[in-house]
């Protein structure tokens, strides 16, 4: 597939007339040869959003099988791009090819899982309450409920998942599955990869005979395109993964519109790992190795990267610290996604090291090329951690801090101190159950996913996954951005009261023509 540097607005390829953007290879620090990518204008955003609005009714009422087939075609089209896609993504992101092949598998698998979900129809939550004409003192009307799509969704591609959380990634798949047209703002860190995937979606729209506005891909230099997209009246929800500053800026724009809309922003999390004494007593070296491996995975550029370990002082914690220092010391430096992300990491790691009461425990192998991050482990005590709010800031990259607590009470105080997190992990043995029983109720208030004896990186795409959590981990703790429940962000309930049969949607029709599981007078039935 030839990359042209065009935006994809509905069925057209459109050359952006604003400042051209160049793709960069972070591993070499050099520009990738032409084409340059023309940035869009507010007029381009307007064109894409108006097409999305025009496509909405036809797309959301498509038979479920056809909507599912559309998602499967996108999945097959991405798989068919073969090595050309992973090679381009490798050149643009510096991520290893094996990682990108895995990520492509996840992207394809996630689209297919959403296709299954669309067909199954549970997300419609069809609910029927019979009329009660003889109820006293007042009769009850007949009520039927189903969920409907919200409307066109703006998706901001994430820098750290060029495939699985970008143009055809989790947010796009969930929105399309829910029946929402999508306008994607490509992330500037992988513009060629974005165009390749965007062209697959554009082709699938055409092949299925869908209205062209079901999908558009916009390129933007500076903030104006993203701001115009979130402010556009046709857009009814936003999916975003990135910085806290970016996510909160978009939340403000969305809240200040004449019609405010939800922003589902996944922003910053430091994913604490609690090292309970029994577990450290029996396997401190193994836990240290697992922790360091999770910390440096993908140069630490995961939202679930373990940025903090917390333990109670004693010989077992000393052994953990020593083993973690050894494991980290041999880890090679790795290329980060962009020069900006690399600079922000170096600054964050320097800030951690310069904090009074924090000292360096270990450093990985030094950088040997441009934009390479060395791993870093710091240590502090609970008193310092509790007194210094900046120690809770996300440092995006392979840096983490070990917090030493005097006793269990201090460890629980550290847990209580946290702001919202995507994950919280407990390393524990049977002896640790009483402490864990005191810790879990605190962590349930803080995080979207609680793990025992694992490490937080590696987010399964499944029905029971929650990739979310209270602010600042996300902008809305009621939602997940990974897994099939992610569709719920782009749906809303509608109740049909005393509707004649001819006007009822099929999911709620008498005789259950779609064969769905439905809630009828409180009972779940397939009838
Ligand atoms: P970012 O700076 O937040 O940018 C993400 C996307 O949002 C880009 O398309 C960007 O557009 C747009 N954007 C940001 N601020 C905006 C604003 N005020 N108005 C309109 N659009 C805006 O994130 P990034 O480029 O991926 O990485 C920067 C930092 O984000 C990292 O160093 C890291 O700290 C954090 N990050 C965190 C996670 C996580 O999962 N926790 C993931 C990725 C990044 P432009 O590129 O045109 O500015």
Image: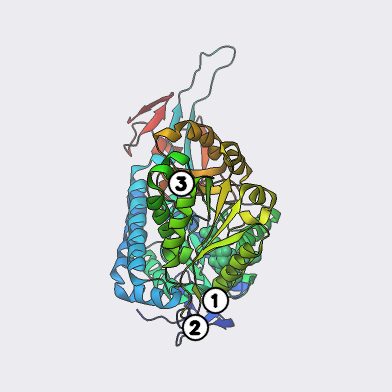
Identify which residue, 26 or 48, lies in the foreground: 26
Q: Which residue is mark 2?
A: 29
Residue at disc 1, secondary structure: helix
Q: Is residue 155 visible?
A: no
Residue at disc 3, secondary structure: helix
* Residue located 49% across and 60% down the image: 182
Q: Is residue 54 visible?
A: yes
Q: Earlier in the sequence, mark 1 or mark 3?
A: 3
Q: Horizontal and vertical percent for residue 276?
A: 47, 41
Q: Most extreme residue toward the front, as rendered?
A: 315
Q: Horizontal and vertical percent for residue 32?
A: 45, 84
Distance from label 1 to label 2 (Cα)? 8 Å
Judge whether 308 appears above or below 1 on screen: above
Q: Which residue is mark 1?
A: 339
- Ligand 1 shows up in the quarter that is bottom right
Judge whether 285 appears above or below 48 on screen: above
- Mark 2 C-beta closer than 8 Å to ligand 1: no
* Residue located 47% across and 40% down the image: 277
Judge whether 16 appears above or below 146 on screen: below
Q: Which residue is mark 3?
A: 316
Distance from label 2 to label 3 (Cα)? 43 Å
Q: Horizontal and vertical percent for residue 259?
A: 66, 52
Q: Horizontal and vertical percent for residue 495?
A: 52, 35
Quadrant placement of the C terminus:
top left
Quadrant placement of the N terminus:
bottom left
Q: Most extreme residue toward the top, as rendered?
A: 136
Query: What is the crowding at mark 1: few (fewer than 14 residues within 10 Å), some, or many (at least 20)?
Result: some
- Mark 3 C-beta closer than 8 Å to ligand 1: no
Q: Earlier in the sequence, mark 2 or mark 3?
A: 2
């Amino acid at each position: 597939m030839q990359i042209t540097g065009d935006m994809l607005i509905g069925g057209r390829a459109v050359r952006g007339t604003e400042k051209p953007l160049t793709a960069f290879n972070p591993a070499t620090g050099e520009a990738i040869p032409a084409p340059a990518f023309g940035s869009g204008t507010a007029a381009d955003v307007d064109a894409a959003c108006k097409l999305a609005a025009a496509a909405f009714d036809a797309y959301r009422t498509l038979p479920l099988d056809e909507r599912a087939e559309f998602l499967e075609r996108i999945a097959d089209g991405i798989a068919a791009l073969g090595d050309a896609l992973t090679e381009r993504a490798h050149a643009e992101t510096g991520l290893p090819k094996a990682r990108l092949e895995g990520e492509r598998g996840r992207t394809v698998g996630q689209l297919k899982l959403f296709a299954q979900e669309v067909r199954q129809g549970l997300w419609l939550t069809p609910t029927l309450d019979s009329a009660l004409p003889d109820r006293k003192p007042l009769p009850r009307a007949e009520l039927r409920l189903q969920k409907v799509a919200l409307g066109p969704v703006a998706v901001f591609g994430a820098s750290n998942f060029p495939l699985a959380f970008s143009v055809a990634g989790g947010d796009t798949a969930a929105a399309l599955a829910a029946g929402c047209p999508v306008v994607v703002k490509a992330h500037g860190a992988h513009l060629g990869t974005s165009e390749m995937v965007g062209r697959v979606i554009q082709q699938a729209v055409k092949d299925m005979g869908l209205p062209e506005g079901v999908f558009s891909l916009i390129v933007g230099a500076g903030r104006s395109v993203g701001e115009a997209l979130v402010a556009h009246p046709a857009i009814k929800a936003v999916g975003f993964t990135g910085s806290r500053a970016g996510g909160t800026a978009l939340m403000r724009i969305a809240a200040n519109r004449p019609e405010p809309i939800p922003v589902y922003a996944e922003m910053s999390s430091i994913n604490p790992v609690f090292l309970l004494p029994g577990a450290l007593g029996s396997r401190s070296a193994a836990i240290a190795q697992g922790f360091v491996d999770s910390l440096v995975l993908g140069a630490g550029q995961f939202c679930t990267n373990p940025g903090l370990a917390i333990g109670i002082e004693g010989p077992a914690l000393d052994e953990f610290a020593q083993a973690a220092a050894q494991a980290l010391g041999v880890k090679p430096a790795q290329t980060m996604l962009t020069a900006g992300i690399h600079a922000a990491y170096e600054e964050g790691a320097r800030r951690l090291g310069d904090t009074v009461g924090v000292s360096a425990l270990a450093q990985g192998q030094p950088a040997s090329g441009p934009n390479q991050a060395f791993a870093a482990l710091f240590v502090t005590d609970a008193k310092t951690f509790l007194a210094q709010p900046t120690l809770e800031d996300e440092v995006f990259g392979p840096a983490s801090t070990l917090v030493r607590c005097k006793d269990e009470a201090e460890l629980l105080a550290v847990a209580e101190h946290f702001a919202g997190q995507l994950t919280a992990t407990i390393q524990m043995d049977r002896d640790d159950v009483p402490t864990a029983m005191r810790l879990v109720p605190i962590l349930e208030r803080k995080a979207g996913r609680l793990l025992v004896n694992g490490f937080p990186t590696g987010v399964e795409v499944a029905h029971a996954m929650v990739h979310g959590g209270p602010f600042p981990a996300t902008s809305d703790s009621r939602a997940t951005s990974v897994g099939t429940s992610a569709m719920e962000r782009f749906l809303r309930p509608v109740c049909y009261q005393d509707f004649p049969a001819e006007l009822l949607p099929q999911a709620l029709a008498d005789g259950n023509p779609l064969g769905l599981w439905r809630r009828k007078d409180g009972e779940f039935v397939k009838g």
